[in-house]
Structure formats: structure tokens, C-alpha cells
Amino acid sequence: KQEVTQIPAALSVPEGENLVLNCSFTDSAIYNLQWFRQDPGKGLTSLLLIQSSQREQTSGRLNASLDKSSGRSTLYIAASQPGDSATYLCAVTGGNYQLIWGAGTKLIIKP
Amino acid sequence: DTGVSQDPRHKITKRGQNVTFRCDPISEHNRLYWYRQTLGQGPEFLTYFQNEAQLEKSRLLSDRFSAERPKGSFSTLEIQRTEQGDSAMYLCASSSRRGQETEAFFGQGTRLTVV
């Protein structure tokens, strides 16, 4: 059974710092891995999608990496801003096309 | 097309009442998913449609829950005889398969509060 873990559960850093969020999964048989952002009480916004054959994806200040063999992904946020404050969730798509989720990392960027 | 839309955004209901939520996926997407999310947790899978066929249901989807996608377009999720434990955010997502791509796009969710 696929399990997805995100560490840390919460993170608070000063504005301007670079930071890394971690995601690990137990079964490497995945189609892809997605990183999402969720603001309080809101739905999910897809940030980056990494296909199983890819190693990384970049969008603006965000860079996500995937090491399928070790079951790990990282989300790197450069030059963090207060507007980046949100919960970040990773999810893997398995053979049945379901998304299996981590519990998220709550990120607070202090001005 | 503005993406996945869900209606209503918020619903407050008394315990024991029935509620129905609607999801309109991105028009060319053939896959539609329902998830449930409680505070501080990641979403949990409920059910999945490919076109009009319901291909998978989670054990979380008790007999009080039913989902339909009658014409392979919009979907409804009904909860009968609601209980306080049903209070959660109900999320709908859609995706299509292009080559190996299966990126899922989510609606804003329906927040259900059972009082």
C-alpha cells in the first residue's frame, strides 16, 4: 500500500530565505508526482507535475525534484515571500490513477 | 473553460438531512475524482469515474454516500442521513490522459458542516 509522508509538518522562516520541503513515498511504481498549494479553507492549486520519467520541474521560484528509486521528492522555494505562506501537499498518482497524499507542510513566511 | 467548478461552496445542514454536491470538470477531461479532506489532513480518495463509469470506490464511501456521472460530464455526490462526522471539505478533480500525463486539476471544494 502506497504511503506518502511529508516532513516537516510545519515550517516558519523569515522572508527572503530559500527553503526545501520534503516528500517521501513507499512504492516507486508511480505515474507522476504533483505538488499542490492550499490556502486556508480553499481548494488545491497544482504547482508542479513531475512525470515518473523526469527528474525535476521548474516554475518561477519553485523547483521540484523526483528520485523515484529512493522514493523522494523535494520542493525548493527560492527567495520566499509572505505570499508563499500556505500548506504545501505532495501527491503521487499510482496505477489506478488515484492520488495518494501526504498530510502537508504548513509554511509560514515571516515578513 | 475556467477549470473545475464545484457547487455549492459552503453547505450547512442539520444532522439527518440529505445533501447533494455538484462538480463540473474541465470539459475535455474524461476522468473525475471525489476526495474528502478534514482539517490538517491530506485529501482522502472517495471515488473515481472514467467517462460515465464509476470505476473505483473507497471503503470510506459508506452506503449513505452515492456518486453519479450520468452523461460523462458533470458529477453529483449525495450524502444521505448526514452525520457530524461527515463535516469536511469535499474536493472534486478532473484529469485527462495525454500520453503519460495525468495531471489532476481541482475545484475550490464544497465545505460541509453538519450541525
Image (cartoon, coloured by chain):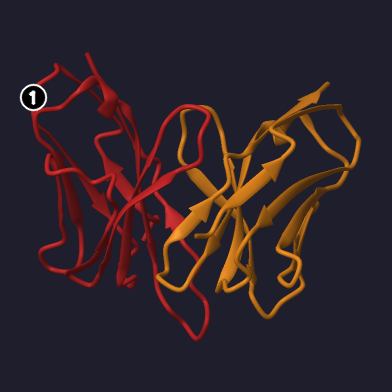
Amino acid type at image mark 1 = Gln
Query: Residue A107, image x and y in percent?
Result: 72, 31
Query: Residue B93, image x and y in percent?
Result: 38, 55
Residue at (71, 70) in percent of width and height = A68
Tell how many labels: 1
In terms of secondary structure, where does tag 1 sit?
A: loop
Residue at (77, 55) in percent of width and height = A74
Relative to B107, say whether B50 is above or below: below
Residue at (29, 53) in percent of width and height = B58
Residue B83 is left or right of residue B28, and the answer is left
Query: Residue A17, image x and y in percent?
Result: 91, 36
Relative to A31, say whether B68 is above or below: above
Residue at (50, 86) in percent of width and height = B99
Disc 1: host chain: B
The residue tagged 1 is: B17
**Nearest the eye: A40 or A83:** A40
**Nearest the eye: B74 or B63:** B63
Q: Quadrant of the C terminus of chain A?
A: top right
Residue B99 is left or right of residue A48, and the answer is left
**Nearest the eye: A103 or B1:** A103
Residue that sits furthest to the top in the current view: B115
Residue A11 is left or right of residue B39, and the answer is right
Query: Residue B79, image x and y in percent?
Result: 15, 37
Residue that sits furthest to the front in the current view: A1
Residue that sits furthest to the bottom in the current view: B99
Q: Which chain is red?
A: B
Residue A73 is left or right of residue A33, and the answer is right
Q: Which chain is orange?
A: A
Which quadrant would residue B37 be assigned to in this image? top left
Crowd rating for badge 1 (residues with CA inside 10 Å; few <14, some 14–19, many 20+): few
Relative to A71, say whether A106 is above or below: above
